[in-house]
Amino acid sequence: QVLLVESGGESVQAGGSLRLSCAGSGFTFRYYTMGWFRPAPGKEREFVAVIDCGGRSTYYADPVKGRFTVSRDNAKNTMSLQMNSLKPEDTAVYYCAARRICTFPLVKRAEYEYWGQGTQVTVSS
């Protein structure tokens, strides 16, 4: 059974930093492309960042480029999202997602097979 569990979300002031984690279990982590998504206000989940199976390639949505960094540790079955210079508009529930394919990049919500339950990030001004 594939299980993804996010953690690390909390309330911070604008300009601050947070590090989110996604722990995977029940599958061979290194065979999966991993991504982060968050819902825009009144909309479905939108792409934030993606990392390839080997952790060598990353790709980001324009609003987070230069501020967020995605990484993974295949030995520990974890993926992280380092978020710096946080803005109030970054406030959202952040979800990690996985798909058993090493095609890169995957930026559409429908391309992912498995999802975590989400972790809340709140950025106050």
Image (cartoon, helix red, strand yellow):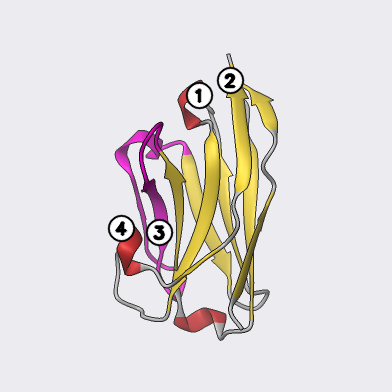
**Residue 77, x across and y down, in percent:** 63, 74
Residue type of the residue flagged with mark 3: Val
Q: For residue 9, which quarter of the picture?
A: top right
Residue type of the residue flagged with mark 4: Val
Residue 49 as seen in the image, left or right of residue 92: left
N-terminal label among 2 and 4: 2
Q: CA distance from mark 2 to mark 3?
A: 24 Å
Q: CA distance from mark 2 to mark 4?
A: 27 Å
Q: CA distance from mark 1 to mark 3?
A: 20 Å
N-terminal label among 2 and 1: 2
Q: CA distance from mark 4 to mark 1?
A: 22 Å
Q: CA distance from mark 4 to mark 3?
A: 7 Å
The residue singled out by tag 4 in the image is 107
Which of labels 4 and 3 is toward the front?
A: 4
The residue singled out by tag 2 in the image is 14
Residue 102 as seen in the image, left or right of residue 114: left
**Residue 45, x across and y down, in percent:** 40, 48
The residue singled out by tag 1 in the image is 87
* Contact between labelled residues 3 and 1, with CB atoms less than 8 Å apart: no
Q: Secondary structure at mark 2?
A: loop
Q: Secondary structure at mark 4?
A: loop
Q: Residue furthest front?
A: 42
Q: Which mark is residue 50?
A: 3
N-terminal label among 1 and 3: 3
Could you classify mark 3 by the number of other residues whose Cα lies within 10 Å: few (under 14), some (14-19), or many (20 or more)?
A: many
Q: Secondary structure at mark 1?
A: loop
Residue 38 as seen in the image, left or right of residue 13: left
* Contact between labelled residues 1 and 2, with CB atoms less than 8 Å apart: yes
Which residues fall within the magenta stretch?
40-67
* Contact between labelled residues 3 and 4, with CB atoms less than 8 Å apart: yes
